[in-house]
Amino acid sequence: MNQQHQSLLLLDSAARFPPPQGVKFSYGTSGFRADASILESTVFRVGILAALRSIKTQAVIGLMITASHNHVSDNGVKIADPGGEIMSQEWEPFADSLANASDPKHLLQLIVEFVKKENIQFEGGRGAEVFLGRDTRPSGESLLEAAKQGISSIVGAVAVDMGIVTTPQLHWMVRATNKGAKASEQDYFDQLISSFRCLVDLIPQGDQGKNQEKLIVDAANGVGGTKLEVIKKSIHGLNFEVRNSGKEGVLNDGVGADFVQKEKVTPHGFGPADVGIRCASLDGDADRLVYFTALPNCNGKIELVDGDKILSLFALFIKEQLSILDEANNEKVNNLYQAHLGVVQTAYANGASTDYLKQTGLQVVRTPTGVKYLHEKAADFDIGIYFEANGHGTILFSSNLLTWLDGRVNELGSTGKGSEQLKASLRLLAVSKLINQAVGDALSGLFLVEAILQHMGWSIHKWNKLYNDLPSRQLKVKVVDRTAVVTANAETEVVSPPGIQEAINVLTAKYPRGRCFIRPSGTEDVVRVYAEASTQEAADDLASSVAKLTDQFLGSH
Ligand code: 16G
Ligand code: MG
């Protein structure tokens, strides 16, 4: 390629996307996010980054335009790596410096230096290919155009517009394409519907058809609603209704998983007639899922069934299948495979959930907040289940285990023996196809929850009784510089400023079952406080005294 031609192309296109004055962008826990009106130059530059990443990895890369559960006037952009996972943290500093480059010349210089440092080879290999997706935000259209311009300012790079999709759908498409599998939206729906069907068909005789009460899904007036309507046309064995599908109300306004989980009240569009019914909520780009049920005579108060409980339900079901296979292992010594099952949580996981999981004999590990950390840890297991309390999570299967399961199915299927083991293997394989292997996915999570509830013959109430959540409280504190808070041990301990952790410990020790931590937010300019204790009053008290303490240590000017 002609280097001069490439440089001129970059300079020329960058001149059409000047960055806003006086704004500093940062590729946070989930990409760049800001008011949509100031994002064009950032999205354009992320387009360039995506094309470079595609050349570097010699694979298709995803670029998603969304601000998830944020206000409709916000937007954002993030990158999906070749396996469909969140972009490698190694490239985050480059993303930051690209977004903040003051003018086209500076931008070009950064690119030239980075290409050299990363040894990105423009010649010889395949050209860049980037899949683009966006949520339903009106600003998505012009931002998509900016992304396309960014991509096409790298010579030979191709952008493929996947249209309006959920974030997990785009990640899934990237992953499937790079694996050489079918990767259209219809393929995504087909895989979801057929693996759900498979799980329902494998429900033990007699239990089939139980728990067929209607499910109501609050789709946050976002992209998930439209997709669910499509699935509804072809799926059998599930009776559900979609509300807040986006035809009328405003995106994320008093609706959706984030609202329901934080406010613990029913979203708009739900009323007294829905009391006691099993309900689910997605967020605006459908990568978070929580369940709830409205309490009688409580003015919209709900019983929340959060990500921790979804994780517990999944863990229970998978453990059950693994123990069926283990029995077979005991009989057939030559076919041993000890599948290593582990669960991954953050410090926000309710203490009662962690206790429950440990009591059932599961290995529980903790990581800092943010999908990138949980995902990475979960990949260490044969089956790694990760969830944040806020409803973001999935189940990862190792390729070793999947190969072994395929082998079991072939062997057991041909001998016709061991039908329970055969069913358990088929169930696990179906779960691995149903649940998104790239990233947490509210749609696939929802169908897995529904299949398991049917399998167990459980109502949402029975499910919610797995354990009782400890009362908790979250607060945020505005401080001068939140980066002054440095944590360790998966954010459960503050190492700097010195002295604050000791003070938190003293306060926490006053409350039975007290637990408390502070951490700098990755998405907002605040320090977050989380407290839990045996009563709501105690949790509230602990949270507010630690908030006060944080304010004393870090100032609030
Ligand atoms: C982002 C993260 C989410 C995390 C949240 C914490 C991804 C895709 N999303 O939304 O996992 O729970 O940030 O926000 O990683 P905070 O740092 O402001 O508390
Ligand atoms: Mg989201």
Image: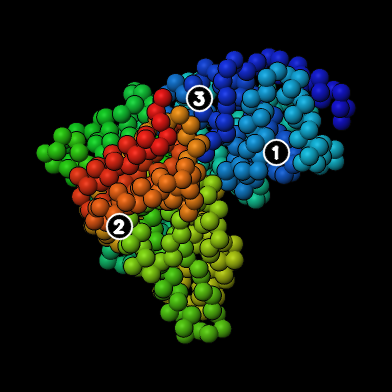
**C-alpha span from label 2 to label 1:** 42 Å
Q: Which label sits on residue 34? A: 3
Q: Residue at x 22, y 47 (%)?
A: 538
Q: Residue at x 51, y 21 (%)?
A: 36
Quarter of the image with the C terminus is top left
Whether disc 2's CB lies below 8 Å from ligand 1 is answered no
Q: Amino acid at mark 2?
A: Ala
Classify 222 as above or below 239: above
Q: Is residue 392 left or right of residue 105?
A: left
The residue labelled by disc 1 is: 53
Q: Could you tell me residue 29's position as x and y percent?
A: 52, 39
Q: Considering the numbered disc 3 on the image, is that residue within a helix, a strand or a loop?
A: strand
Name which of mark 1 and mark 3 comes first in the sequence: 3
Classify 491 as above or below 352: above
Is disc 2 surrounded by few (<14), some (14 to 19) or many (20+) residues within 10 Å?
some
Q: Nearer the viewer, mark 1 or mark 3?
A: 3
Q: Could you tell me residue 420's position as x and y percent?
A: 41, 74
Classify 219 as above or below 73: below
Is residue 278 visible in the rendered image? The answer is no
Q: Which label sits on residue 352? A: 2
Q: Is residue 95 left or right of residue 522?
A: right
Is disc 1 surrounded by few (<14), some (14 to 19) or many (20+) residues within 10 Å?
many
